[in-house]
């Protein structure tokens, strides 16, 4: 879409899953979160994430929150 500003928080769930040879469905089953909710997070469409969800993902993927979420101010007209 022309003129669309990318979200400032990039979710790197795909990269982490690929590095660990795990599918989104597998992660969903392991942490007890619906596939639909994980998909919303993965595509960057989530408006918020609970700390309990972040903790479960990090525990299962053996990563830190900063490995999963990356802030970028790219394209922010206010900066």
Image (spheres, rainbow, N blue to C red):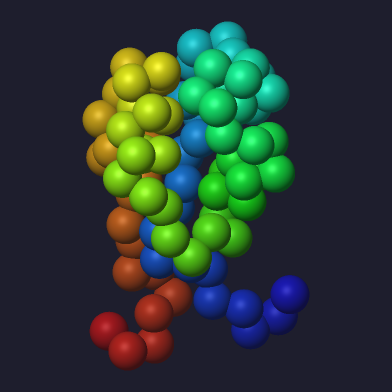
Residue 79 image offset from top left, x and y in percent: 27, 84
At a point 41% along the width and 29% down the height, the residue shown is 57
Question: Looking at the picture, does residue 18 appear above or below residue 71?
Answer: above
- Residue furthest toward the top? 21
State the count of labels.
0
The answer to which of 8 and 45 lies nearer the viewer is 45
The answer to whether any part of residue 67 appears in the image is: no
At a point 26% along the width and 40% down the height, the residue shown is 66
Residue 63 image offset from top left, x and y in percent: 30, 23
Looking at the rendered image, the quarter that the N terminus falls into is bottom right
At a point 54% along the width and 59% down the height, the residue shown is 46
Question: Looking at the picture, does residue 9 appear above or below residue 7?
Answer: above
Residue 60 image offset from top left, x and y in percent: 41, 18
The answer to whether any part of residue 36 appears in the image is: yes
- Residue furthest toward the bottom? 78
Residue 32 image offset from top left, x and y in percent: 55, 27
At a point 38% along the width and 28% down the height, the residue shown is 56
Where residue 62 sits, quadrant-wise, is top left
Give the side of residue 24 with respect to residue 7, left or right. right
Question: Looking at the picture, does residue 41 appear above or below residue 55?
Answer: below
The answer to which of 72 and 52 lies nearer the viewer is 52
Give the side of residue 17 with respect to residue 9, left or right. right
């Amino acid at each position: 879409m022309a003129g669309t500003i990318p979200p400032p928080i990039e979710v790197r769930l795909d990269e982490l899953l690929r590095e660990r040879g795990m599918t989104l469905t597998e992660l969903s089953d392991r942490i007890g979160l619906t596939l639909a909710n994980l998909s919303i997070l993965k595509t960057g469409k989530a408006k918020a994430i609970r700390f309990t969800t972040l903790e479960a993902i990090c525990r299962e993927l053996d990563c830190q929150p900063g490995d999963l979420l990356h802030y970028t101010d790219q394209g922010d007209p206010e900066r």
